[in-house]
Image: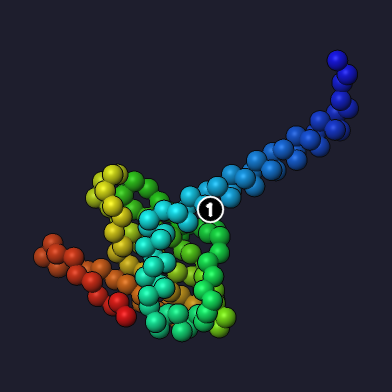
C-alpha cells in the first residue's frame, strides 16, 4: 500500500475538518432559524408597522452570532439577538421566549428592535397580571 507524504495528510485533514466545521455551523444556524421561538419573534417584527418603516424593505435576517451571550436557549427559556437589516437601517431584534416544560409550546415574553443608532422600538411585550397573560405594545 503506497504511503502519502505527511504534508498531503495534513493538508487533506485540515480541508476536511474545515469543511466539517462550516457544515456544522450552517446546520446550527438552520436549526435556530426553524425553531418556533425564532419564528414567533420574526412574525411579530413583520407585523409591526413602525419597526418595518424604520428598517425599510426588503427585510433581511442574518446569521446569529453563536458566541454572543445574548443568544441563549435551554429547556424552558430562549433569548436571541437576531441581526436584521433593511434598505434604511440595520439593527438587532431581541426575542425573549419561555415555555412551561420541554414538550409545551414556546410563548413570547418580549420582542424589541434595537437599531444601530441606539433607537429601541418595542415590538411586543407580555405582562402577567393576576396569572393572566395580557398583550401590550403590539402595533
Q: Quadrant of residue 70?
A: bottom left
User: In the image, residue 29 lies at what x, y percent?
Assistant: 53, 53
- 104 left or right of 73? left
- 8 left or right of 90? right
Q: Quadrant of the N terminus?
A: top right
The residue sitting at 40% across, 72% down in the picture is 45
Task: Using the rendered image of the protein, determine whether residue 51 is visible from the camera's viewpoint.
Answer: yes
User: In the image, residue 124 lies at what x, y percent?
Assistant: 32, 72
Under circle 1, the secondary element is helix
Q: Quadrant of residue 7?
A: top right
Q: Nearer the viewer, residue 5 or 105?
A: 105
Task: Using the rendered image of the protein, determine whether residue 116 is visible from the camera's viewpoint.
Answer: no
User: In the image, residue 115 lies at what x, y percent?
Assistant: 49, 77
- 26 left or right of 136? right
The residue sitting at 53% across, 66% down in the picture is 61
Q: Nearer the viewer, residue 111 or 34?
A: 34
Q: Nearer the viewer, residue 91 or 57?
A: 57
* Label 1 sits on residue: 29
User: In the image, residue 3 lies at what x, y percent?
Assistant: 87, 21
Q: Is residue 6 above or below residue 121?
A: above
- 107 left or right of 23? left
Q: Nearer the viewer, residue 74 or 58?
A: 58
Q: Is residue 58 above or below residue 19?
A: below
Q: Is residue 91 above or below residue 18?
A: below
Q: Residue furthest top?
A: 1
Q: Residue furthest left?
A: 130
The residue sitting at 52% across, 48% down in the picture is 28
Label 1 crowd bin: few (<14), some (14–19), many (20+), radius 10 Å: some
Amino acid at each position: 500500500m503506497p504511503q502519502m507524504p505527511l504534508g498531503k495528510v495534513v493538508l487533506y485533514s485540515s480541508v476536511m475538518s474545515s469543511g466539517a466545521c462550516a457544515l456544522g455551523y450552517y446546520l446550527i444556524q438552520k436549526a435556530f432559524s426553524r425553531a418556533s421561538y425564532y419564528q414567533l419573534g420574526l412574525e411579530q417584527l413583520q407585523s409591526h408597522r413602525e419597526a418595518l418603516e424604520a428598517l425599510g424593505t426588503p427585510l433581511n435576517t442574518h446569521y446569529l452570532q453563536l458566541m454572543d451571550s445574548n443568544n441563549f436557549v435551554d429547556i424552558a427559556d430562549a433569548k436571541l439577538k437576531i441581526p436584521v437589516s433593511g434598505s434604511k437601517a440595520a439593527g438587532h431584534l431581541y426575542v425573549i421566549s419561555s415555555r412551561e416544560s420541554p414538550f409545551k409550546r414556546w410563548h413570547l415574553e418580549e420582542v424589541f428592535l434595537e437599531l444601530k443608532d441606539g433607537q429601541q422600538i418595542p415590538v411586543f411585550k407580555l405582562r402577567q397580571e393576576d396569572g393572566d397573560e395580557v398583550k401590550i405594545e403590539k402595533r
